[in-house]
Image (cartoon, grey):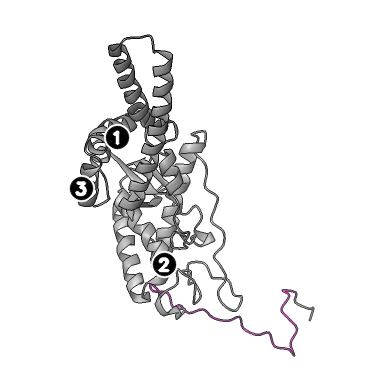
Amino acid sequence: MSELVTGEAVALELRPAKLPSRALAVLLDLAVALIAYLVVTTGVVIATASLDEAAQTALSIAMFVLLLVGGPIAVETLSHGRSLGKLACGLRVVRDDGGPIRFRHALVRGLIGVIEILMTLGVVAVIASLVSARGRRLGDVFAGTLVVRERIPVTRTGFVPPPPPWLAGRFAGLDLSAVPDGLWLAIRQYLTRMQQLDPQVGWSMAERLATDLAGRTGAPAPHDVPPAAYLAAVLQERQAREARRAFGTGAAVAAPPPPAPAAYGGGVAAPAGVPYVPPAGVPYGPPGGTGHSPVAPDVVRQPAPPVPQDEPPATGFAPPA
């Protein structure tokens, strides 16, 4: 799977196209181009029957260049990397960073494709695709592009569990400019797969990632927040900033105050200053779901004390003597 990361720290889980599907797409494109070339050339020859042989030869060469070279370039440019063959096979040409291609990318691919596909009958393109780790031919290497599969089975591995609601806006003041894309990718991949890991292994990975992230931001990770919840909250803050930068007006948006911590088991709310301990089964909870906080092991969720049935509940009103 191709490791492509956008500015919003979203890993584009794009799968490079395999050689058989790419070859089928190229054959379909060549068949359409050859049919168009024959039809147009026949019409031009009939219309220019009065011209001499040299003029007809020049027109044939011009039609060849226009339809078999310029046609695919124009189609890929206007469709952002989806020719007729690629559309039929569920493929698309994208840049190395996952963005849509432009005219210069399609031009380089088309010009080099004349040599490695048309003039060598595809032998050079096949050898280059077999040697490349991501199945790229020479045109893709020089243009900085990649052919990927668009139709892939939908799985739940790409779902990032949201952070606890009480962490909303808590990390709005962090400086995230020094965090590299590789660390964002590692954090997102961990969050999408942490429930598939061994609890102890997953917890240690979260602690290492949280330490690396805290070192990049210049602020220590809070001791009252589990490492996985800290990673999810900071990742959500990064995505919120990118969304405001892309779609907002540029004005600073004040983060809402964090709500009260979630209730402990038994209906007793977490007292002030006590770290939040998720119950067993919550993704951000400690390994084993024991209910103990990893940073404050002696803090245990306590059930609400029962009210005696033979005594009236306390109301704060003292009767007169």
Q: Residue 127 got which mark? A: 3
Task: Inspect the image, locate mark 3, and give the three-letter code of the amino acid beneath it.
Answer: Ile
Residue at image mark 1: 109
Quadrant in the picture for residue 118: top left
**Residue 243 x, y percent position in the rendering:** 48, 42
| Magenta residues, start to end | 292-317
Outermost residue to the bottom: 310
Residue in the image at 30% along x and 64% along y: 208
Residue 226: mark in rendering: 2
Q: CA distance from mark 2 to mark 3?
A: 50 Å
Q: Which comes before the other along the chain, label 2 or label 1?
A: 1
**Which quadrant is the C terminus positioned in?**
bottom right
Q: Which element type, helix, strand or loop, lies under badge 1?
A: helix
Q: Nearer the viewer, residue 226 or 173?
A: 226
Q: Quadrant of the N terminus?
A: bottom left
Q: Nearer the viewer, mark 2 or mark 1?
A: 1
> Does 102 appear above or below 264?
above
User: Is 115 on the left-hand or right-hand side of 223?
Assistant: left
Query: Which one is closest to the eye, mark 1 or mark 3?
Result: 3
For the residue marked with disc 1, what is the amino acid? Arg
The amino acid pointed to by label 2 is Pro
Which-is-in-front pick, marks 2 and 3? Answer: 3
Choose top left, top right, bottom left or bottom right for residue 34: top left
Question: Image check: 260 left or right of 136?
Answer: right
Whichever of callouts 2 and 3 sits on the residue coming sooner in the sequence is 3
